[in-house]
Image (cartoon, rainbow, N blue to C red):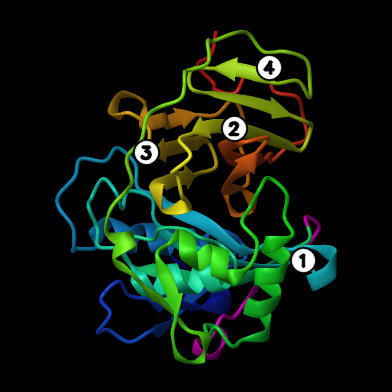
Amino acid sequence: MASGGDDIKGETKLVCIPCDNDAPLAEWTIPYTEETEVPCVTTRLQEHFKHFKGGKPAAVPFQFAETVPLRSGSVDNGFMHTNMYCDDNGVAKDLPINARACAFAAACGRAIQVRGDAFVARFMDSEEEFQRHDMTLADVSSDAAWVKEAAVFNAQRPSGQAGGLDAMASSLGMTPGPGGVMTAGAANAGALTGGAPPAASSSGPGTDGEDKAEQGFSWQQDEEEVSLQVECPQATKAKDVTVSFAPSKLSVAVATLDAAATNVVKAATLFARVRPDECTWSVGNESGKRMLTVTLNKEKEENWPSLFADSS
């Protein structure tokens, strides 16, 4: 956290959505210096998640703030990014499901399961310039113009992402309440079960742009992105998936796979660094198969000879 008044460059506001439904939403203010403007939010939230009480004790080797892009920046919106942040160890800690955060993410066109407290923040990043922008309580509303625009934007994204608020809400077991506000149903309480697809055999990396098979998933890349695909049981929904992004690490878990295959990627060290705020995942149907697609945005444009640092 920033210290020393003369070093402070500015402050940014973000909104906390507590997992306790009786606790009100709250604005947080985080100061930053020239050096901490980019990591100030995730650094502060990692501390919050580390000390949050509300689940069961769990021995977790790393504590990260999982990033969920609610509206990725693009030329159309002036490269304005709006993200939700939550505890990447929420499942391991058995944190309670945050029904309000799930509903708000669904309103933005992102059907996800959120455990523990959640936070919403905004920033502008054109890769040439980075600026923090405030997120206020008035912005965290299903009636906000940016939320409606985000739902349209996310519905048009590739990789089989579900289109429309009703489809997003349905996958979370939610129904529209008064004024279009989404409410969580009993389906949020647990994961579905199903059989695991056959695991792909491991092979060496292919040329740029070709599929490479690993144990339980395949991946391909170009110079800017890496895309992983996991074939899932047909019953799989977004609430059954947990993906954690960090600059050098990746975790992917699918609850509907057999127990031995649930952790598809477990805190693995990537071959090179990625930009967590710009990484995404989605669940959808492709050619009759239920697929989880994870997209990693590379920090540097280059071809990776392998996905993970410890690959031979």
* Rendering quarter of residue 95: bottom left
Q: Residue at x 61, y 43 (%)?
A: 285
Instruction: Check the image and report above or below for 50 versus 192.
Output: below
- Tag 1 secondary structure: loop
Which of the two labelled residues, at mark 1 and mark 4, occupies the earlier sequence position? Answer: 1
Q: How far separated are the C-alphas under marks 1 and 4?
A: 30 Å
Instruction: Check the image and report above or below for 48 versus 229.
Output: below
Q: Which mark is residue 305?
A: 4
Q: Which mark is residue 256?
A: 3
Instruction: Check the image and report above or below for 21 versus 153.
Output: below
Please provide percent x and percent y for residue 240. 39, 47
Magenta run includes residue 24: no
Type of residue at label 3? Thr
Q: How far separated are the C-alphas under marks 1 and 2?
A: 27 Å
Comparing labels 4 and 2, the label whose residue is closer to the camera: 2
Which of the two labelled residues, at mark 1 and mark 2, occupies the earlier sequence position? Answer: 1
Circle 4/circle 3 CB separation < 8 Å = no
Which of the two labelled residues, at mark 1 and mark 3, occupies the earlier sequence position? Answer: 1
Q: How far separated are the C-alphas under marks 1 and 3?
A: 35 Å
- Tag 2 secondary structure: strand
Please provide percent x and percent y for residue 116. 30, 63
Crowdedness of circle 4 by 10 Å Cα count: few (<14), some, many (20+)? some
Circle 1/circle 4 CB separation < 8 Å = no
Q: How far separated are the C-alphas under marks 4 and 2?
A: 18 Å
Q: How far separated are the C-alphas under marks 3 and 2?
A: 15 Å
- The residue closer to the viewer here, 211 or 162, is 162
Instruction: Check the image and report above or below for 51 versus 310.
Output: below
Q: Is residue 106 visible?
A: yes
Crowdedness of circle 2 by 10 Å Cα count: few (<14), some, many (20+)? many
- Residue ID for mark 2: 229
